[in-house]
Structures are given as structure tokens and as C-alpha cells.
Image (cartoon, rainbow, N blue to C red):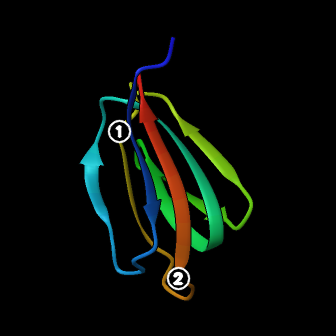
Amino acid sequence: MLDIQGIYYDVEPSWRTEKSRGHNTLVYAAEGKVLYFIDDKQLELDKGEVLFIPKKLYRSWTNHPHESHKKYTAVFS
């Protein structure tokens, strides 16, 4: 069974998060582009793409320098 910790719709183009870990995370990019850093490797998530981040990995994210984004994020264990 999934224990949902939160579901978020991010629409603020200036948000960013510091490196952390602790919950499984599923991200859907609804618009634009966003940059994720997973264990210090950079990934670009584009509109229509989905990213699963297991709880054991460190992650952070920031806006793409040339394009804003909107995304849905589910955090669960």
C-alpha cells in the first residue's frame, strides 16, 4: 500500500529545493522544463515526461535557465 505524504502542483517559476532524500517521488512535467540533480547528476525534465526518484537517492531541483515550468509531484513511501 502507498502512504502518500503529499501531492503538489508547482506553478511558481522561481522555486528551487536543496538536496534532500527520504521519500519516493514521482514528478510529471506539465509544461516547460525543470532541472533535477539526482546524486549530483543533472537531468532535464521536459513537458510530458515523468521522473521517478527512489527514496534512497539525494535530489534537488531548480528552474531551467531559459524556460519556466509547471509540474505535479507526488511524495510517498
Q: Does 56 sit above or below residue 40? A: above
Report the residue marked by disc 1: 58
Q: Secondary structure at mark 1?
A: loop
Question: In 3D space, how far apart are the residues under numbered discs 2 and 1 (Cα atoms)?
Answer: 23 Å
Say which amino acid is labelled 2.
Ser
Instruction: Give the percent coordinates (x, y) of residue 47.
Output: 70, 67
**Label 1 amino acid?**
Tyr
Estimate the x, y position of residue 25 in percent, counting from the top left: 47, 38
Q: Residue at coordinates 48% horizontally, 57% vertically from top-left?
A: 36
Q: Position of residue 12 (x, y in %)?
A: 39, 77
Location of residue 77 with respect to 57 vertically, above or below: above
Q: Which residue is mark 2?
A: 68
Pick the front one: 47 or 9: 9
Please determine whether, in this image, residue 4 is positioned above or below residue 45.
above
Q: Position of residue 43 (x, y in %)?
A: 57, 57
- Quadrant in which the C terminus appears: top left
